[in-house]
Image (cartoon, rainbow, N blue to C red):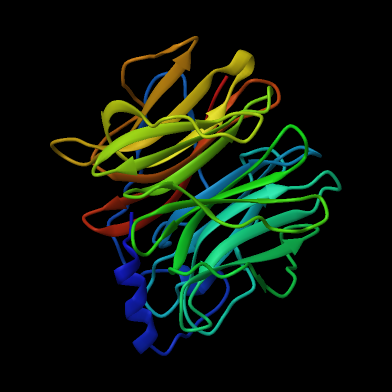
Amino acid sequence: MRPLAVALISLALTLTGCGQNALMGGPSVSAAPQVTAGWTLTRVTPEGVRAVEPSLIERQGGGFAIAFSSDKLGDQHVYCTTSPDGSRWTAPVAVAKGPLTDESPALYEDAAGTLHLFFASNRSQRFRLYETTSPDGQTWSEAAALPEDPDQSYRPSVATLANGTLALAYETLGGAIRFRTKSAQGAWSEAATVHAGGGDPALAALSDGRLVVAYRSYGKLQTRTRSAAGAWGEASDLGTAGEAPSLAAVTQGGLWLVYAAETDAAYKLTERKLEGAAWTSETGLTTGDTDDEDPAAIVTRSGERVMVWGARKDGRGQGLFFARRS
């Protein structure tokens, strides 16, 4: 949950370091989050890795891919790691590294098995969105800029609609949430404002063609639904305080919402579920004395619930963690 203002500091920095060692933040007290009953926890990155804003997908051929940002000053870039089973993870590799700050990755995989990664970068002196692709998560194409927003843009979220159209939501520097679609021919639509005062958008596509976006608005979580015909409904206030929501579609039109909620001691991951027409009450997912932030949650093809997030202890990064629940 790092504001863009922090990233702008990097404009005055000389950026150094690459590869896995560049992510290490120096000595820190070892700490790992704790998960509630029914979850299995795996560490993705080594202790001391400064990792935030992860994006998680299930690969079509099996296994998972994660992209994340490093918030280590002097090495604010995007990295990717893959796993055949969720237990063993490759060493993170830098993705389309630019001369300044790269952050806020969003992953998806197309029908051919190619990974697409969208991210925000100020390599042109203004924050805008870029796209890069990879066949394997190891080698990445040169980043291509998306159509520029009148305001600076970051924190993208992507989802594929039932008709194959790619949907993209993102946050602007001025605090608006905007939305675009990309046709099968690669043409982007004009940006439309979904919400004028919010951030942290998270998209989920439903099997009937509807699209739902969850977002933070003045400390509270809200959702809006786009019909299969392309019309946005009214905003729905969930009555929940939280940050960095992640939204995943489940069978029969349900939704799984995971977000960071502030407790008396620290930020903890919390879930709510849309079952039928009603949202369930809040349920905690993590415990312990770490700050658990920036969750990315998915429901696999087999129905398993999986999430990844960054943990901190006393302000120091403790790495990324992956948890699953059948």
In the image: residue 230, left or right of residue 153: right
x and y percentages locating residue 253 in the rendered image: 59, 17
Residue at 83% x, 43% y is 111
* Outermost residue toward the top in this view: 276
- Which quadrant of the structure image shows residue 314? bottom left
Q: How many marks?
A: 0
Residue at 30% x, 70% y is 5
Image height of 223 relative to 197, above or below: above
Residue at 46% x, 11% y is 277
In the image: residue 85, left or right of residue 315: right
Q: Between residues 204 and 321, which one lies in front from this camera angle?
A: 204
| Quadrant, the N terminus | bottom left
Q: Between residues 262 and 129, which one lies in front from this camera angle?
A: 129
* Outermost residue toward the right in this view: 112
x and y percentages locating residue 234 in the rendered image: 41, 30
Q: Is residue 26 visible?
A: no
Q: Is residue 214 visible?
A: yes
Q: Between residues 23 and 305, which one lies in front from this camera angle?
A: 305
Image height of 103 relative to 212, above or below: below
x and y percentages locating residue 178 in the rendered image: 48, 52
- Which quadrant of the structure image shows residue 286? top left
Residue at 66% x, 29% y is 228
In the image: residue 74, left or right of residue 20: left
